[in-house]
Image (spheres, grey):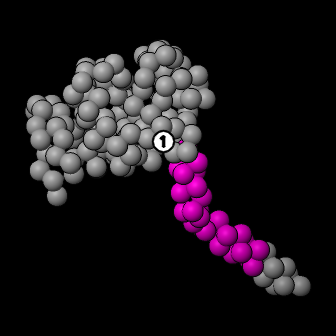
Amino acid sequence: MKKLFLLVVFALLVSTFSFATDKPDPSVWRKMVAEAESQLIKLTPEQVKGILDKKENYVILDVRERSEYVNGWIEAENFQYIGRGILEPTLSRTGAIKFDDKVIVVCKTGQRAALAGVSLKKMGYKNVYFMTGGMDEWIKKGYPITNEMGTFAPIAK
């Protein structure tokens, strides 16, 4: 009887842990991003470059991880770097961006930018855009990036 009890307990533990190791469904992430993108105005890297060339009054908000950001960012007169993981509390605490500012959110591929843009809208920011394709597309186009060594045109891969 004791062996049967232990066998049942062991079977329950094994089944519990086997379910706990299941991976999340990647389609959920894609749906979240698609929904976020549908709530924002999309700007291509070409459009963002045009805005910067005309010196239009936009904030470029880079939400990448610091390890990504230090490799190069978009040089802009009104640039803010706030990593995605601390975006909402930082803006709530500092007011670094005004609610009426026109904000273009950028990240590596555009996905985090879309999600961050939706957060900004929920916080009360009125003019939120995101750059499709992110820094990956910006670099593919050969547009200039800046890092601690200066500003330069990247070599497209």
Residue nearer the viewer, 57 or 155: 57
Would you say the magenta stretch is mainly helix, strand or loop?
helix
The vertical placement of 38 against 25, above or below, is above
- The quarter of the rendered structure image containing the C terminus is bottom left
Q: Position of residue 133 (x, y in %)?
A: 35, 49
Residue 60 relative to residue 23: left or right: left
Residue nearer the viewer, 135 or 89: 135
Residue nearer the viewer, 68 or 39: 39
Residue 119 relative to residue 78: left or right: right
Q: Quadrant location of residue 25?
A: bottom right
Q: Position of residue 13 (x, y in %)?
A: 72, 71
Residue 7 relative to residue 113: left or right: right
Q: Quadrant location of residue 36?
A: top right
Q: Residue at x 61, y 68 (%)?
A: 22
Question: What range of the chain is rendered magenta?
Answer: 10-36
- The three-letter amino acid code for the residue at tag 1 is Ala
Q: Residue at x 58, y 48 (%)?
A: 35
The vertical placement of 120 against 10, above or below, is above
Q: Position of residue 37 (x, y in %)?
A: 51, 45
Residue 116 visible at all: no
Residue 115 visible at all: yes
Q: Residue at x 38, y 46 (%)?
A: 132
Q: Residue at x 18, y 37 (%)?
A: 145
Element type where label 1 sits in the image:
helix
Is residue 55 on the magenta stretch?
no
- Residue located beneath label 1 in the image: 114
Is residue 25 on the magenta stretch?
yes
Q: Callout 1: few (<14), some (14-19), or many (20+) C-alpha neighbours within 10 Å?
A: many
